[in-house]
Amino acid sequence: MKAFLQSLKGDKKVWGIVFLMMVASLVIVYSAISNLAWRGSGSGQVLSMTFKHGMHLIIGLGIMYFVHKKPYKYFSSIAVLLLPVVVVMLIFTILQGNQIGGANASRWIQVPFIGMSIQTSSIATVVLYVYVARYLAKIQDKSVTFKEAFLPLWMPIIVVIVSILPANFSTAALLTLNLGIILIIGRYPIKHLLVMLVAGALLLSIFISLALKFPDAFPNRVHTWTNRVESFMSPKDGEEQYQVESAKIAVAMGGVFGQGPGKSIQKNHLPQSSSDFIYAIIIEEFGFFGAVGILSLYFVLMYRMVIISRKAPTIFGSLLVIALGIPIVLQALMNMSVAVGLMPVTGQPLPLISSGGTSIWMIAAAIGMIISVSRETQELEEKEAEGMSVIENADNNEIVNELIEGELEEVV
């Protein structure tokens, strides 16, 4: 164990936050997952489901460890190679149209031979963030026209967002928001960004109108989106409102100190108690202090990412940290906002805490890349410190030699 801890390079505080989140996740999911274990045709095996979640966390930790050992400059080229692959995966995902329990589940695909499903949008978003960071780093000292940027920048963004949108509006919306922030921080021309936002809003309006008029033309969840927004603006009876009300009850029952670990009642009523609404269960069991504690972990994580970004030895390294760090924190804030009734239901998990496979692994990969930047920064600082030490020793030796020579001359 000691040898493993010593092999962890980069920002130790980020490692510590991630470990703490994973431990908290295991405890919280163990309590919250009982609903899924007994629901429908569930086997009631809470321990086996918790073990599965624990394995997801361990694999995520392994991914993070493997990625953080690699030079971060390689991720730039890997993103270029993987971008066409993830686009094909997204198109295949939306066309194959799997259904689970009668619900549209076209955001997942089944991996042959191993019998597991992966959420392709989680993979695509991470690859796209790295690709955009690469592009922004390359144009920092250039004046790029909209026409020049359309094919290398906007075309991949449009294809990925359009491929995700029909089956997963919240992910597409969050991706758009994150990319807008990343582009602004990356000093991309604001007027070009506004043009694309206006065009995107118009195309989205047309898409929603067509999808509502022809609901069976292709797989989409437009009715689900509109129901969620309408339910949020004007509460009415239904599945969405049932979840929201159950979450509010959980928050109210939490109070200051909470009901205690494993003592949640609303986990038996919330359909997604271990994923989408896990923050409500955290508040019910651990109260106000538990809620603030989890929120603080994300803010501290963001703070450490800002420090890593500022110290990064290259522009790409700095932008890579921002491009991967901001989405994690914004997704967490979105999940928490839904749980306390500040936003419509979105279906976004709480990063590194909610149950899941692909989402945990891709967030782990993103944090691994961030730590890779901090690792190389530390290595450069250590080399510079060693170089200064060598220079100081050389200067000291010269002084000593001059003194010795001076004393010999006096003797002579």
Image (cartoon, grey):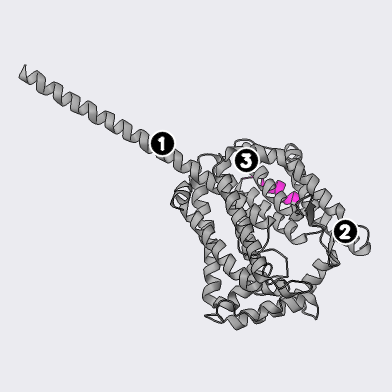
Secondary structure mainly formed by the magenta segment? helix
| Residue 54 horizontal/vertical position (percent) | 61, 61
Graded by Cα atoms within 10 Å as few (under 14), some (14 to 19) or many (20 or more), the crowding at tag 2 reads some
Q: In the image, is residue 23 above or below residue 247?
A: above
- Kind of residue at disc 3: Phe
- In magenta, the rendered stretch is 187-196
Image quadrant assignment for residue 219: bottom right
Numbered circle sitting on residue 75: 3
Task: Looking at the image, tell me whether mark 2 or mark 1 is earlier in sequence order.
Answer: 2
Q: Does the segment drawn in magenta span residue 191?
A: yes
| Residue 169 horizontal/vertical position (percent) | 77, 60
Q: Which residue is mark 2?
A: 219
Task: Looking at the image, tell me whether mark 3 or mark 2 is earlier in sequence order.
Answer: 3
Q: CA distance from mark 2 to mark 1?
A: 55 Å
User: Is residue 195 visible to us here?
Assistant: yes
Graded by Cα atoms within 10 Å as few (under 14), some (14 to 19) or many (20 or more), the crowding at tag 1 reads few
Residue at (73% x, 75% y) in the render: 38
